[in-house]
Amino acid sequence: MAARPQDKPPAPRLYLVTPPVGDSERFAGELAAVLGGADIAAVLLRLEAADERSLINRIKALAPVVQDKGAALVLDGHPDLVARAGADGAHLTGIEAFKGALPTLKPARIAGAGGLRTRHDAMLAAEAGADYVMFGEPDGERPSFAAIVERIAWWAEVFEPPCVGYAETIDEVGQLAAAGADFVAVGDFVWRDARSPVAGVSAAAKRLFAAEALG
């Protein structure tokens, strides 16, 4: 595994995680507004369970909303639907799911890895060709925030593939960026912002900018 170059890395960017989407037409307008509220590198699209055709139709309806803003559309799972629905890649949870999806995704599509319980799993994902690794996503067994920050700092210092830090609250955004995350994933707290999701993502972007300025 190649060591990360010593030059200052690019400024961290936001990675937007959607709520589970069932009605793509209803969600499209809200998503477009949020994407217009901050610089978003990618959108992780979570989908409510449905038959394959319905899933493809939802993805196709939302893909141009995301891609026209210059962001990548990454599916939460469903690697077999990526090319057929016009998405840019898939995020897989767990090292086995990630490795199993690689033949479908690589080399043309993004293959992201999350749910990595150990440092060894993260290294295996990177060695297999992960386009990024994610730490801290709330999948039922989230470690302490201090442990997530430590994992990101370790990764940022040693490894070249980008890492994503998942922020459960707005207060975590700046700390993850300061630890060395290349991208900070934001989700529920943005969509549940009492003012509006646009205000929520704008506030997250400000925290990111502040962390970069201090760095």
Image: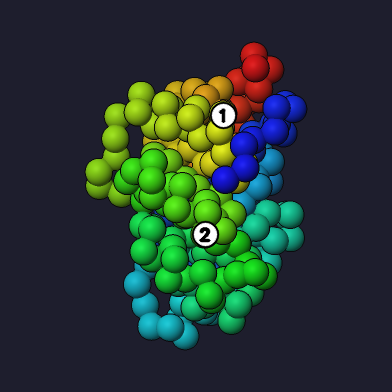
Q: How crowded is mark 2: few (under 14 residues within 10 Å), some or many (20 or more)?
A: few
Q: Looking at this rendering, what residue extends furthest in the top direction?
A: 214
Vertical relation: 132 (above or below) 129: above
**Mark identifier at residue 128:** 2
**Residue drawn at (51%, 69%), measured in percent from left and top?**
102
Vertical relation: 177 (above or below) 84: above
Amino acid under label 2?
Answer: Ala
Instruction: Work out whether residue 80 or residue 97 is closer to the camera in this orientation and state it.
Output: 97
**Mark identifier at residue 19:** none
Q: Whole-percent x and y of residue 50?
A: 37, 77
Vertical relation: 8 (above or below) 47: above
Q: How crowded is mark 1: few (under 14 residues within 10 Å), some or many (20 or more)?
A: some
Q: Which corner quadrant of the image does residue 83 belong to?
A: bottom right
Q: Whole-percent x and y of residue 23?
A: 46, 69
Residue 125 visible in this rendered orientation of the protein = yes
Name the image quarter holding the C terminus. top right
**Residue drawn at (60%, 70%), measured in percent from left and top?**
106
Left or right, 20 with respect to 185, comes to left
Q: What element carries label 1?
A: helix
**Residue drawn at (56%, 33%), measured in percent from left and top?**
158
User: Distance of mark 2 from mark 1, alpha carbons?
Assistant: 20 Å
Q: What element carries label 2?
A: helix
Amino acid under label 1?
Answer: Glu
Name the N-terminal-most of marks 2 and 1: 2
Disc 1: which residue: 157
Left or right, 208 with respect to 78, comes to right
Instruction: Work out whether residue 142 or residue 205 is closer to the camera in this orientation and state it.
Output: 142
Q: Looking at this rendering, what residue extends furthest in the front direction?
A: 1
